[in-house]
Image: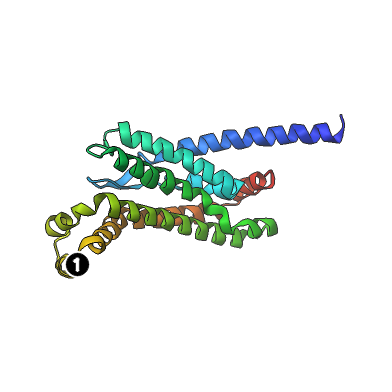
């Protein structure tokens, strides 16, 4: 058997392992999204590390592959939102459904796969401490990007709920000040920042901490390094 044939076989094996691993991790991310520490009645929940599997895929196989895996997870989340118990698209017009599907699901979950943006040099140098730090920073950044996307979506699609929210739900001195000093698009944006922050800030902390812990485990880190080397 010549070297070129052996390389091709190894390449095929690596490709198969990547597909199988990615399918398992996407499925795990989807399943974990059903395990919730808290759930808000008008959308959004604090889940049990549901973003971490996609973060790890981005670190293992790079930004492009991670983005694709995040997009697939976003499609699954959109289908769950449409046909699950939450009925996320109920009462929305066609344009609103398309916009919400793209922002709150496709884009918001796709960016999670970009988590490997900072970790490449650390992986090449096999520096355990830097891998954990850079991987965690990447997780923090992509989690925050997801939060920003939800803010944009919330301000555009659900900004009309702002006055009700600050009058009936977020009733305190801060809510009164916001109502007295902001109007229109500004009020809608502030509402979206606060509402989405109620679940996204805990999600950011959970995702960043979960990534840091996993990347600090030698066995898991070695598997990630092996997968990254096969790219």
Residue at 60% across, 47% down: 60
Given residues 213 and 165, the one toward you in this image is 165
Res. 45 in view? yes
> From what the image shows, is residue 87 above or below residue 149?
above
Residue at 21% across, 61% down: 184
Label 1: which residue? 178
In the rendered structure, the answer to whether residue 67 lies left or right of residue 15 reads left
Residue at 42% across, 58% down: 144
Where is the C terminus found, in terms of image quarters?
top right
Residue at 31% across, 41% down: 95
Residue 61, horizontal then vertical, whole percent: 61, 46
Residue 1, horizontal then vertical, whole percent: 86, 29
Residue 73, horizontal then vertical, whole percent: 45, 39
Q: Quadrant of residue 102?
A: top left
Given residues 182 and 3, the one toward you in this image is 182
In the rendered structure, the answer to whether residue 42 lies left or right of residue 73 reads left
Give neighbour class at mark 1: few <14, some 14-19, many 20+ (Cα, 10 Å): some
Farthest residue, direction left: 168
Residue 120, horizontal then vertical, whole percent: 63, 56
**SS label for mark 1:** helix
Q: Quadrant of residue 18?
A: top right
Farthest residue, direction top: 1
Res. 29 in view? no
The chosen color scheme is: rainbow
Farthest residue, direction right: 2
């Amino acid at each position: 058997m010549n070297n070129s044939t052996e390389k091709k076989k190894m390449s095929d094996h690596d490709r198969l392992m990547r597909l199988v691993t990615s399918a398992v991790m996407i499925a795990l991310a989807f399943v974990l999204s059903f395990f919730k520490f808290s759930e808000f009645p008008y959308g959004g929940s604090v889940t049990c590390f549901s973003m971490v599997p996609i973060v790890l895929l981005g670190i293992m196989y790079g930004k492009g592959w991670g983005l694709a895996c995040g997009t697939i997870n976003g499609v699954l989340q959109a289908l769950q939102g449409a046909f699950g118990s939450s009925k996320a698209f109920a009462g929305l017009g066609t344009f609103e459904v398309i916009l919400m599907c793209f922002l709150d699901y496709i884009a918001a979950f796709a960016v999670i796969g970009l988590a490997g943006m900072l970790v490449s040099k650390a992986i090449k140098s096999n520096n355990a401490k830097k891998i954990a730090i850079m991987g965690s920073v990447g997780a923090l950044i992509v989690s925050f990007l997801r939060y920003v996307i939800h803010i944009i979506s919330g301000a555009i699609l659900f900004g009309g709920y702002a006055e009700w929210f600050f009058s009936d739900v977020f009733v305190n001195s801060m809510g009164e000040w916001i109502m007295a000093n902001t109007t229109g698009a500004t009020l809608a944006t502030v509402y979206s920042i606060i509402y989405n922050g109620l679940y996204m800030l805990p999600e950011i902390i959970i995702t960043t901490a979960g990534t840091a812990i996993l990347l600090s485990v030698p066995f898991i880190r070695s598997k990630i390094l092996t997968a990254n080397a096969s790219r």
